[in-house]
Image: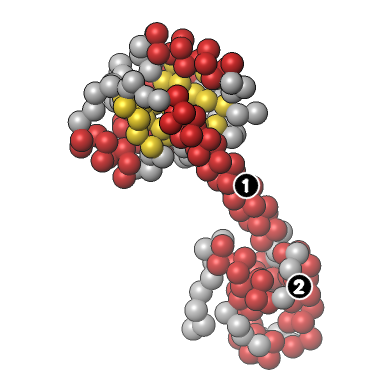
Amino acid sequence: MKHVYVIDDNPVICTTLGETLNRLGYTTEVYSDPLIFLQNSMPVSPAVILLDMRLPTMSGVELQQRLQEIGRQTPIVFISGESMSSEIVQGMKQGALDFLFKPFNLNDLLAAIELGLDKDRKQSTNTAQQRSLRAKYDSLTAREKEVCGLLGQGCLSKKIAIDLSISTATVKVHKARILEKMEVTSLQHLALQLEQLGLASKPG
C-alpha cells in the first residue's frame, strides 16, 4: 500500500490530486481542514502528506509542528501557491521533504511522493527494530542490566565481579543469559545495541 494524505482547502486541487493519485495506484485521504485531519486520520505506513501552506484554523507549518509534538513522523511535502520565504525556510528546517509551488509538474510531485514513501518505510523499519531491541533489554533482570551495562563498557568479568560483589562464575552465567536474551554472539554487538538504545556509557 502507498498512501497519500492530501491537506488543501481548494476543492478542485483536492479532487484532482485524489483522482489522479488513485488512478496511479495510490490510496488517498483528502482533508480541507487540518483540525479535521488531526481528529480523524489514522497513521498508516508507508505514507506521505501533501500539505498546503494556507489553510483554515492553522498554517501548514503550524500543523507540521503539531504533528511533531504528537510524535507523528509521516514525511511532509509542502504544496503551495503563495508562501513567504520565512515559511518555506521554517518548514524545511522542521524536516519537510520538499516544497512544490502550484502549479507543479506531475512528475515532480510523484518523485517527491516516492521519496517520502521510501523515507517512511525506512523510519517504520527503524522504529520496529528499536521497539524489538527495547523489548529484549526490558526482558533482562535488574542484575543482568547491571552486568550488561558493565559489559557494554568493556569491563572484564573479574572487574564486574569485584564491582558488584559477586563471583566471577556468577558474572559468566549472567553474561551468557544476557547474550542469549539480547540475541547477540559478541560483546561488540552488545555494546552497539546499548548505544542504539542510548544506554552506552564510558567506564567510570
Q: Give the vertical position of 5 relative to 172 (above or below).
A: above
- The structure residue drawn at horizontal position 77% and vertical position 82%, both measured from the top left corner, is 172
Q: Give the vertical position of 163 relative to 11 (above or below).
A: below
Image position, residue 62 (x, y; %): 31, 31
Q: Quadrant of residue 83?
A: top left
Identify the secondary structure beneath mark 1.
helix
Tag 2–tag 1 contact (CB < 8 Å): no
Image position, residue 35 (x, y; %): 39, 20
- The structure residue drawn at horizontal position 32% and vertical position 22%, both measured from the top left corner, is 102
Tell me the tag on residue 67.
Answer: none
Residue 147 visible? The answer is no
Q: Give the vertical position of 32 relative to 90 (above or below).
A: above
Residue to which mark 1 is pinned: 125
Q: Nearer the viewer, residue 71 or 31?
A: 31
Residue 103 visible? The answer is yes
Q: Which amino acid does the dot numbered 2 rest on?
A: Thr
- The structure residue drawn at horizontal position 78% and vertical position 75%, both measured from the top left corner, is 176
Q: Which amino acid does the dot numbered 1 rest on?
A: Thr
Left or right, 37 with reference to 114: left
- The structure residue drawn at horizontal position 38% and vertical position 43%, both measured from the top left corner, is 95
Instruction: Tell which tag, 2 or 1, sits nearer the viewer.
Output: 1
Residue to which mark 2 is pinned: 185
Q: Give the vertical position of 133 relative to 179 (above or below).
A: above
Q: Nearer the viewer, residue 38 or 21?
A: 21
